[in-house]
Image (cartoon, coloured by chain):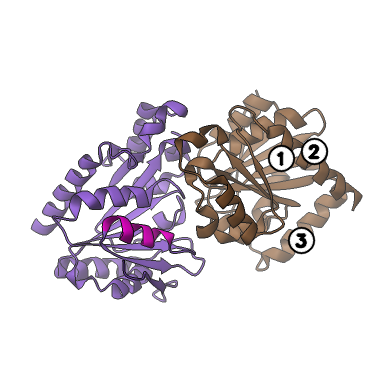
Chain colours: A brown, B purple
Amino acid sequence: MDEIKTIVVNRSAYADNDLEADALRSYLKEKGTFLVNLMSSPGAGKTTTLTSLINILKKEYRIGVMEADIDSDVDAISIAKNTGVKSIQLHTSGMCHLDAGMTKDGLDGIKFEDLDLIFLENVGNLVCPAEFDTGASLDIMILSIPEGDDKPLKYPLVFEKCDLVIINKIDTIEYFNFDFEKCKKTILMRNPNATIIPISAKTGENVNEVAKYFRNKIKSWKEN
Amino acid sequence: MDEIKTIVVNRSAYADNDLEADALRSYLKEKGTFLVNLMSSPGAGKTTTLTSLINILKKEYRIGVMEADIDSDVDAISIAKNTGVKSIQLHTSGMCHLDAGMTKDGLDGIKFEDLDLIFLENVGNLVCPAEFDTGASLDIMILSIPEGDDKPLKYPLVFEKCDLVIINKIDTIEYFNFDFEKCKKTILMRNPNATIIPISAKTGENVNEVAKYFRNKIKSWKEN
């Protein structure tokens, strides 16, 4: 395993993040690289889900991962070790989210030109990351069973903003008081277009469904 | 149960939050009201822990709870229903944390003059709340077993800032890969003065230890 590259990223100097995000999205489209922004609470299973998913998809796509954290590089090391794909760590200098400028710094660092698919693992936070467009072509979030079924009520924006909601740790549902149907209903009330896929990243249950979702999304992104 | 009062709180107009927080702390000391700021990730069990703890302490202290969320009032309703103490909901207008000005607005709303002990349940977020002093005399955080033992590595500030770390959901430890000793060591590396108490808010296990901790803290706060 190569040593993990760590990049310090800072708040963008650009006043209009949305404009910068749109420009980044167009640029990546032109280059043929599909960027995915992954959000969740701390500990919902972003890295485990990525590991499981990448091990299914890595024969079909050239994949890279940018792991954002305030400190530590345990996630980038874990991804590199458990999947073998190119992985870098972004340090956010205490910032609670990534914006388009910070994402661009990360892309410069990972040298994305030879990659088809890049996952950006955002800072674990259900609030701030949803407020800043990173320039990704797909926004996904992970809600985990132990967090409870009331999260779409309390953190509306992230559920409104994402295309796919993965409900992780379903292998633990019997130990927690989680009403799956109620949760699904609240998510769809916030975002009628959301796709919802329950999985267990730990056991691998249903991760194939997420892989299938990605294949379709990338295919239609290429065609449009 | 009375209807739950909801207050919309906004970012403080004061430039220097630290000054305002110190002033609020002195004012509350003078009035004899002990304010506690409770932080955690979404779904770590703040409301369940408070319910369990308040049901032990409510015969000894006149208690109030201010529940902060971006949206919904499920937590304030739950506290009022399950403990009977005075409870209000603070809506943060999308903000990811509370500052001293917002806390003061909450205190004006709860009419704290007849209360000995007030719990402020901050927005579920391991990043931003730690950056803003609320004016509380005690900062506590809850880390839950399903989130993983690496959180003190990734979210340093909140662990550095708090007096007490409660490790919740220990009843689920056999289902998760959580190294308790490693986690404790990392917390103490971040914050050598932190007290660490493992509990299960759901089963009530060890919540008495937290109650004992509070009695001591309130006693020495009154004496100083």
Q: CA distance from mark 3 to mark 1?
A: 20 Å
Labels 2 and 1 positioned on one and the same chain? yes
Q: Determine which quarter of the picture holds residue B122.
A: bottom left
The image shows a total of numbered marks equal to 3
Label number found at residue A22: 3
Horizontally, is B216 left or right of A58 in the view?
left
Q: Residue beneath label 1, please? A: A110
Q: Is residue B77 magenta?
A: yes
Horizontally, is B29 left or right of B50 in the view?
left
| Mark 3 secondary-structure assignment | helix
Which sits earlier in the primary sequence, circle 3 or circle 1? 3
Q: Residue furthest left?
A: B223
Q: Residue beneath label 2, please? A: A115
Q: Amino acid at mark 2?
A: Leu
Marks 3/1 in contact by CB < 8 Å: the verdict is no
Q: Amino acid at mark 1?
A: Ile
Q: CA distance from mark 2 to mark 1?
A: 9 Å
The secondary structure that dominates the magenta segment is helix
Q: Nearer the viewer, mark 2 or mark 1?
A: 2
Viewer-side residue, A53 vs B217: A53
| Mark 2 secondary-structure assignment | loop
Task: Give the vertical position of A49 relative to A153 (above or below).
Answer: above
Q: Which residues are magenta?
A: B74-83
Labels 3 and 2 positioned on one and the same chain? yes
Q: Amino acid at mark 3?
A: Asp
Horizontally, is A61 left or right of B11 in the view?
right
Q: Percent x, y for residue B58?
A: 19, 55
